[in-house]
Image (spheres, grey):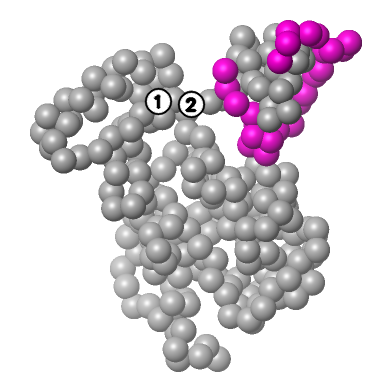
Amino acid sequence: MIHPMVHSAFESLADRDIEIGPSLQQKQELFHEFMTHARRIWQNFDFVEPHVGISNDEPPRKVLAAVVHLGDIKARGNFITHRATFYQLLLSERLLGMPKEAVTKVLIHEAVHLGYPDHNQDFRDLVRQHGGAVSETSIESPGVQVQLKQGARFKTVKVFPEDQEQAAILWAKQELTKNRGARYRILQSTQPRVGQRWRTPGGQIYEILEDTGDSFRCDVHDEAGGLTPNSWSFSTQEFNRMIKSLPLILL
């Protein structure tokens, strides 16, 4: 039985007498994807699965998504050692309008929350291991994003192809003439590409020489320009994870 103080936040879709609309259907489809990621991430997901559901409520604090739960949860590595009484996945309308790749990264993030309630190092490591987004700002959408400040956050309102940064700037300037009090910013994609140079906090510079499709071959320099004895090869997944975790600086 659900405690009455938390019933409204955890109410099951099945308990509601409402018409199934496009957004509700989309949320249910994303819930199925969420459960697929959870099965892949957690070694003992069968221990938790019967206690996981979805709510049609908006997540708190205007976040993209949230997993709310009743009771303590704990995990070690990819094994849940203590489960909640029940969990509910909350998806925002804002998330439904995002690119598929970004949505998947958010769902992986939330699936890891089934075992880790906080964003500690173990949580972040597991999210990165499975290709999720550690935070909303780490979600990489392709192309050049034009973002408009709404409240305390910036929201992507238009996306241009990667080679049309000037067109994105011009569009934002035109929008400013209509609303001079608005605040826009331009975000350029930072996907690794041949010719890019990345610097680590320790002063090493990784120059991407070759992209084979599933790996990058890099020359590693120091700040003084010297070359280490060997070049290095990284899988695409390893290099993307390294960019997020060091962090590397795009030069």
**3D distance between C-alphas at marks 1 and 2:** 6 Å
Mark 2 falls on what kind of element?
loop
- At 45% across and 70% down in the image, what residue appears? 55
Q: Amino acid at mark 1?
A: Val
- Disc 1 and disc 2 in contact, CB within 8 angstroms: yes
- At 57% across and 75% down in the image, what residue appears? 69
Q: Is residue 83 left or right of residue 110?
A: right
Among the two numbered marks 1 and 2 on one chain, the one whose residue lies closer to the N terminus: 1
Q: Which residues are magenta?
A: 223-251
Circle 1 residue: 144
Q: Residues within 10 Å of mark 1 (few under 14, many from 20)?
A: many
- At 71% across and 23% down in the image, what residue appears? 203
- At 33% across and 33% down in the image, what residue appears? 185
Residue 156 point in image, percent of width and height: 35, 39
- Total marks shown come to 2
Residue 65 point in image, percent of width and height: 47, 58
Q: Decide: is 48 above or below 183.
A: below
On whether residue 211 falls in the magenta region, the answer is: no
In the rendered image, the quadrant that contains the C terminus is top right
Q: Is residue 215 left or right of residue 14?
A: right
Residue 157 point in image, percent of width and height: 30, 37
Circle 2 residue: 189
Label number found at residue 21: none
